[in-house]
Amino acid sequence: MSGGLSVTNVVEHAFCPRFTYFQLVLGIEQREGKRGTVLAGRTFHSRHSTTNKSYKIKRLNGVKLTEILLYSKEYMFSGKIDEAIEASDEILIIERKYSDYVVVGPTMKTQLGLLAILAEENFGKKVKRAVIVFDKTKRVEIPVKITKNIKQLALSVLQKTRDVLSSGLIPPSKFDNRCLNCCYRKICPPCTSKRQQSIEGSANLT
């Protein structure tokens, strides 16, 4: 499995390393396909990839590319670029999110870094920038410079994902707001211990 990781696998590890353990080490599927937000997000991506294929964000010149499956022989991982613009001297990645605007943090940077590595290796052109489009209640376009640090971050998370697969050990984590709607919350130790504390606390009040 360590040679067959996908961008999605690594991004999920960036979000929470326990995803790697439960899904790829123990083989427990996420079971999130029926969640409303997940279905809406998939419909959102499908609409943009299958309709108006010639539509491009204004001010971006070049050839629009969609649904590109790529593999990195150098780093041994695969991924799909949903949308990009190929110019004469660069590839510009467009990543659409069915959500309201949030700060572009390590998880999104990991995704963009991996996609940039895939594009540069397969197209032989630099990826200098990307655009993240948040398009739920209000459309917001956020330009992101693809720096060396972003690509190094992505490769670091890729290696950490492989480390969990190699060791087979559950990685450290902590309970926070991400855990509230996580599909693994019923079996994840930080979540189960937190829930048990809540139950015990309620019992002490009665």
Image: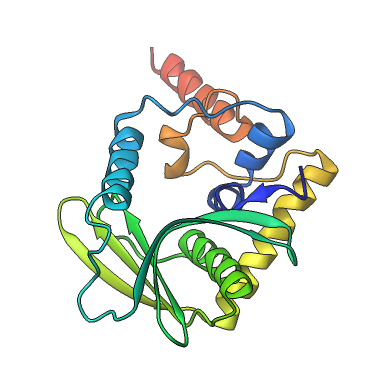
Q: Residue 19's spot in the image, x, y percent?
A: 60, 40
Instruction: Using the image, determine if residue 14 lies above or below residue 206.
Output: below
Residue reaching furthest to the right:
167
Q: Residue 81's spot in the image, x, y percent?
A: 47, 59
Please tell me which residue lies in front, 168 or 200. Answer: 168
Q: Quadrant of residue 202?
A: top left
Instruction: Using the image, determine if residue 148 lies above or below residue 56.
Output: below
Q: Quadrant of residue 23?
A: top right
Query: What residue lies at 77% left-to-right and 48% top-to-bottom?
Result: 2
Please tell me which residue lies in front, 75 or 163. Answer: 75
Residue reaching furthest to the left:
138
Please tell me which residue lies in front, 203 or 28. Answer: 28
Instruction: Using the image, determine if residue 107 lies above or below residue 168.
Output: below
The quadrant the N terminus occupies is top right
Query: Quick check: 177 left or right of 26?
Result: left
Query: What residue lies at 68% left-to-right and 58% top-to-bottom?
Result: 158
Instruction: Using the image, determine if residue 113 lies above or below residue 196.
Output: below
Q: How many marks?
A: 0
Query: What residue lies at 58% left-to-right and 75% top-to-bottom?
Result: 120
Q: Residue 40's spot in the image, x, y percent?
A: 28, 37
Residue reaching furthest to the bottom:
89
The quadrant the C terminus occupies is top left
Query: What residue lies at 63% left-to-right and 46% top-to-bottom?
Result: 17
**Colour scheme of the picture:** rainbow
Query: Quick check: 16 left or right of 128?
Result: right
Q: Residue 106's spot in the image, x, y percent?
A: 51, 64
Q: Quadrant of residue 121?
A: bottom right
